[in-house]
Amino acid sequence: MRARRSRAVSLLITSVVLTGFLLPGAVAQDEVTAPASGTDLQAPAVVDLAQIPAEPPVQPARPAARELFGADCDTEINGSQVVAFCHNSYPQTDLVRLHVECDRWWDVDGDGAAVAVGPAGRVELSGRCWKEVRSAWVSHQRQ
């Protein structure tokens, strides 16, 4: 198989550019490894163990943990039907709302009404499209 002229030219230009990038690094590395004439090498640094604290410094207090909130929802899509099962395991009431996005441009997307899910409460939300469902999700809001 014969290589095209443009491929050969692009390979040549690429190798020249890469060589141009690599040469300054190679020159700088040679200068670092060769010690300057007439200069003495410095002795290694000495650490005084008395200056190292016995314990690590005190850490600042961590900010208070965010309050846990929000019902846990599982969403199932079966054809054009959407069902979301939500369970609130937190002490605050959560307002959940099912949103359904339909796949067809002419099919109307649906946003369900907000439903309050109290502490340890369960709720089932449902929605549908005329044809296929593109996506579905549940939004949460504090009451």
Image (cartoon, rainbow, N blue to C red):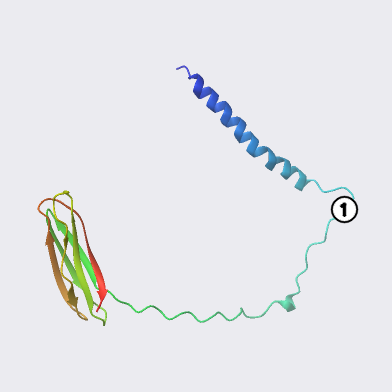
Q: Residue at x 58, y 28 (%)?
A: 13
Against 107, residue 126 (above or below) is below
> Quarter of the image holding residue 140?
bottom left
**Residue at 50% in and 22% down:** 6
Residue tagged by mark 1?
39
Between 19 and 112, the residue placed more toward the observer is 112
Where the N terminus falls, by quadrant? top left
- The quarter of the displayed image where residue 27 is located: top right
The image shows a total of numbered marks equal to: 1
Residue 124 coordinates in the image, percent (x, y): 14, 69
Residue drawn at (60%, 35%) of the image: 18
Q: Residues within 10 Å of mark 1 (few under 14, many from 20)?
A: few
Q: Quadrant of residue 31?
A: top right
Q: Nearer the viewer, residue 47 or 86?
A: 86
Residue type at mark 1 is Thr
Residue 4 locus on image (x, y percent) = 48, 19
Q: Is residue 1 above or below residue 97?
A: above
* Depth check, front residue: 135 or 26: 135
Q: Quadrant of the C terminus?
A: bottom left
Residue shown at the point (14%, 51%) measured from the top left: 132
Rendered location of residue 46, percent (x, y): 78, 68
Secondary structure of residue under mark 1? loop
Left or right for 113, reference 44: left
Residue at the left extreme?
130
Query: Can you name the residue that lies furthest to the right here?
Result: 38
Q: Nearer the viewer, residue 129 or 39?
A: 129
